[in-house]
Image (cartoon, rainbow, N blue to C red):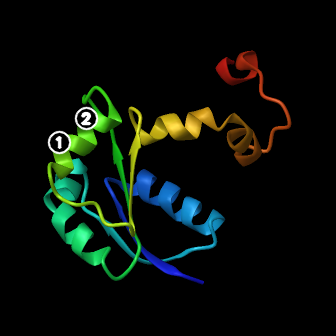
Amino acid sequence: MASIVLATEDELSEQVGLSLANEAGLQVGLCLRKGGNGYLRSRLSSFCQMARTQAVFVITDLDQIQTPAMLIADWFGKQHRPDKLLFRVAVREIESWLIADHLAIRHLFGKKSCKIAELSG
């Protein structure tokens, strides 16, 4: 099984990244997380350097930036993005990805069907 580096903003993003890697048949050898996208942005050149020899998966939130393309352009500038660097932006927050996967959420809570009324009361 191939090993990758996972870099995330927070614990929730890390768990999502671990799950995605597992689904893809990849083993995460190293998790890098220090809270917030400031850490990821400040380490971007290090991640690019690591990606010369091994796969690096970076997950960040869009937050207040208008589009993922704008965030990527802002973070990378003219810096080359290595082929082994997988950079993903959750729009707007990683929680959006989880909520959008309603089938997995139902499975997580052990429900075959999930009605709004059941959740609110």
Q: Residue at x 73, y 15 (%)?
A: 117
Amino acid found under the numbered disc labelled 1: Asp
Q: Nearer the viewer, residue 105 or 87?
A: 87
Q: Position of residue 93 (x, y in %)?
A: 40, 37
**Which quarter of the picture shows residue 4?**
bottom left
- For residue 21, above or below residue 105: below
* The disc label shown at residue 74, or none: 1
Q: Residue at x 83, y 30 (%)?
A: 113
Q: Are marks 1 and 2 in contact (CB under 8 Å)?
A: yes
The answer to whether residue 53 is left or right of residue 73 is: right
Among all residues in the image, which is located at the extreme top? 117
The residue identified by callout 2 is 70
Question: Residue 17 placed where, x, y %?
Answer: 48, 59
Task: In this rendered view, identify the residue nearer to me: 67 or 95.
Answer: 67
CA neighbours of label 2 inside 10 A, class few (<14), some (14 to 19), many (20+): few
The one nearer the camera, 96 or 83, is 83
SS at badge 1? helix
Helix, strand, or loop for circle 2? helix
| Quadrant of the snapshot with the C terminus | top right
When the figure is inspected, residue 70 is found, relative to residue 19, above or below; the finding is above
Q: Residue 80: percent from the left, percent from the top? A: 22, 60
The residue under the point 40% across, 56% down is 11
Q: Amino acid at mark 2?
A: Met
